[in-house]
Amino acid sequence: MKKFYVIVACSVAMTAVLWAGLSAQENKIRVEVLQVTNIEPFQKSFMGFIKELERNGFVQGKNLEVRRKIIGFDMEKANMWSKIGVLMQIKSEAMRLADVKPDLVLTIGTPSTKFAKDKVIGAGVPLVFTAVAIPTAAGCKSMTQAGPGFTGSTLYMSMKDALKIVKLAFPKLKTIGIIHSDDENGIAHVEEAKKVAPSFGMTVISKEINKNDKITDSLNELKAKGVEAFAVPLDTYYGIRNYEACHELEKFSLQTKIPVFSFALMKVPGAVLYVGSDFGEIGTLAGQEAAKILKGEARPESLPILKQEDLKILVDTHMLKALNFQLPMEILQIAQAVE
């Protein structure tokens, strides 16, 4: 009889442990992540998001389960059919998310946000986006309000504020050259820069090229038109082929002594000056909003779209030395050195 009670006691204990394990599994917060292309800036946004959730008590392996889907897309060989294929993959993934109903969905970048949000939100799943440059291009009501069921953080920066810093750095600059692809963000940067530049006594000359084109011919073309400095827009063209265009731009700058500044905080544009939003910080802002939603402190639509209030300013001292170029002390005092 004593042996019987021992067996029963052990059985009850094991059952309790099993149920505790199942309960813990059920109590885990489930977050699904969706993005198109695996690029370094998106990784920074993702890590900023995850670290911010950890700061709010949501830790992977403990009470948080994260599943990340990255849809591959060869931007160099992009054509109509490949773009349609990516769109179909996003919509298929959105249907899966609507079926599994996680506690929250994070979309990284404009395409995944724009084409997945309706299905996800329609299933009652809150959605937070990050690394979106122009919120309205991703389907938001405005630059500060997303809409029912979703919110997020944006890379958007005021071109007026950015060019104000550029003018401070290059007081005598009159003509800026920008080479861009058909990237939505790149086009938006150019259009806004052209509108704002005249108020600072500057003119923007631009050239659109295909993503598989080399940049050097276009650089020479704009140089012949009197360009005094080149700007790198927030355009995926500069990140593909292991930053090939950036390396070519750096070589061109060193040969011609024409300086480069960048609106994209990438690590290798060959620029002397960087002005823009930090992908990691933008991911952190998205994490702040996700934490409020997961804690039940706010509904997505009650949270405004967040952006980095103070633009990050970086200076590459090695590039300055190579060009024998000097920036005003007002810039050097507020800028950080490129790592």
Image (cartoon, rainbow, N blue to C red):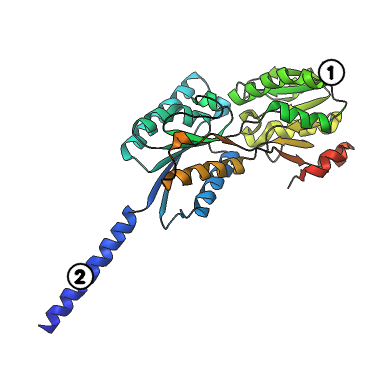
Q: Nearer the viewer, residue 169 or 86?
A: 169
> How many numbered dots are placed on residues in this image?
2
Q: Residue at x 65, y 30 (%)?
A: 234
Residue 326 location, quadrant: top right
- Residue at the far top in the pictured view: 225
Residue 242 location, quadrant: top right
Q: Residue at x 39, y 34 (%)?
A: 93
Where residue 278 appears, as percent x and y from the top left, is 64, 40
Name the residue type under label 1.
Answer: Gly
Which mark is nearer the camera, 2 or 1? 2
Where residue 16 appears, as percent x and y from the top left, is 25, 66
Alpha-carbon distance for marks 2 and 1? 83 Å
Q: Secondary structure at mark 1?
A: loop
Is residue 190 rendered to the left or right of residue 330?
Answer: left
Residue 134, visible in the rendered structure: yes
Numbered label attached to residue 292: none
Residue 217, visible in the rendered structure: no
Name the residue type under label 2.
Answer: Val
Q: Residue at x 48, y 34 (%)?
A: 151
- Residue at the far left in the pictured view: 1
**Residue 15, placed above or below residue 233:** below
Numbered label attached to residue 226: 1
**Where, quadrant-wise, is the N terminus in this rendering?**
bottom left
Q: Sequence order check: which comes first, mark 2 or mark 1? A: 2
Q: Are marks 2 and 1 in contact (CB under 8 Å)?
A: no
Where residue 175 appears, as percent x and y from the top left, is 81, 20
Disc 2 target residue: 12
Is residue 232 rendered to the left or right of residue 154?
Answer: right
Where residue 143 appears, as percent x and y from the top left, is 56, 27
Residue 166 location, quadrant: top right
Is residue 125 rendered to the left or right of residue 35?
Answer: left
Q: Nearer the viewer, residue 138 or 205?
A: 138
